[in-house]
Image (cartoon, rainbow, N blue to C red):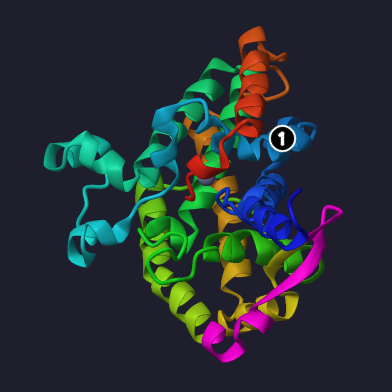
Amino acid sequence: MIKKPLLALVLLLCAYKSYCWGFYAHKQINYYAVFLLPPEMLVLYKPNIEFLSAHAVDPDKRRYMIAAEAPRHYIDADSYGKDAFSRLPQKWDSAIAVFSADTLNSHGIVPWWIQTMLQRLTAAFKEKNQSKILKLSADLGHYIADSHVPLHASSNHNGQLTNQTGIHGFWESRLPELLAEKEWDFFIGKASYLEHPSAFIWKKVFESAAAADTVLRYEKKLSEIAGSDQRFAFEERNGLLVRQYAAGYARAYDRILNGMVERRMRESIYAVACFWYTAWVNAGQPDLKNLSGKTFTEADIKEFAEMDLQWKKRPVTAEHEK
Ligand SMILES: [Zn+2]
């Protein structure tokens, strides 16, 4: 029989395997992005808001089905060196002319992948295919949100190189789950048309890369002041007692980060809405009251089920932590 402390530790590991912004935050980001859209888009997005929110996490589940999925969620800026990263070609074809596709994939490809997804969503709007529009919108929202997370732009993505393992989920899951609903504000205004979506998303990735050091250094400092008894606490989570970053410690971290997590979540919401809107405009603003493909195909339904199944069966040891 497993003794209690060991069981709790196992549970902590499960609870904080990171899922990119955490499932909670991803769902919130897609959900709130809907409210930034113009009325012509709301006719489709509002009645389907639950789908867009629930399926915001599909790309994280898909990585257990498709090997090529994992690099789409991050880019290790520091693997290129600071100057080289700022000079990376922002178009995929130009980038593979300088680095091989293998090299780019090995360091993560999120800013290029977002451009591919934007093209796919634009094509789905042109095709006027409802189920494709919804699926691609949910997916695109995920990758855009990931690009806003500082630790998605660092090879030290879970603090594993600085003895801070677990910080990934601390920043992107624990803080939003603790603070978002009661204390953060997600009313943001209106989506804008992006003249240069590629430059827009690269700017976000540069910001993420620049903030990664702060995310790590401030937690390191705080942990030295607080000590492990204040850093972690046993708290109830989904009816189970788990050892996790203590609520007081999480609040202190949020304070010294000066609202960074809320700010990045707000910026994610805005960016997701802007990309959805831009795809629709670039497709010629089709009438969304009049679409085909209203029901998901059998292949779609099979894919949803398979993603869920593979995600539930994922080996904890093989979990990719970006
Ligand atoms: Zn992700």
Query: Which stretch did the figure color magenta?
Result: 222-241
Residue 185 in view in this figure: no
Residue type pointed to by label 1:
Tyr
Which residue is drawn at the image coordinates 69% and 46% (left, top)? 27
Is 80 rendered above or below residue 278? below
Residue sticking out furthest to the top: 298
Whether residue 230 can be seen here: yes
Hey, which residue is sitting farthest front in the picture?
A: 1
Going 50% across and 64% down the picture, which residue do you hit? Answer: 165
- Decide: is 8 above or below 193: below
Residue drawn at point x = 66 percent, y = 45 percent: 30
Label 1 sits on residue: 45
> Furthest-left residue in view?
98
Where is residue 179 shown, x and y percent of the image?
A: 74, 69
Q: Is mark 1 within 8 Å of ligand 1?
A: no
Nearer-the-camera pick, 57 or 198: 57
In this orientation, which residue lies closer to the viewer: 290 or 187?
A: 187
Residue 198 at x, y percent in the picture? 36, 46
Q: Is residue 81 above or below residue 41?
A: below
Horizontal and vertical percent position of residue 134? 64, 28
Q: Quadrant of residue 265?
A: bottom right
The verdict on residue 299 being magenta is no
Q: Residue 173, position in %: x, y?
A: 64, 59
How many numbered circles are shown?
1
Q: Is 229 included in the stretch rendered in magenta?
A: yes
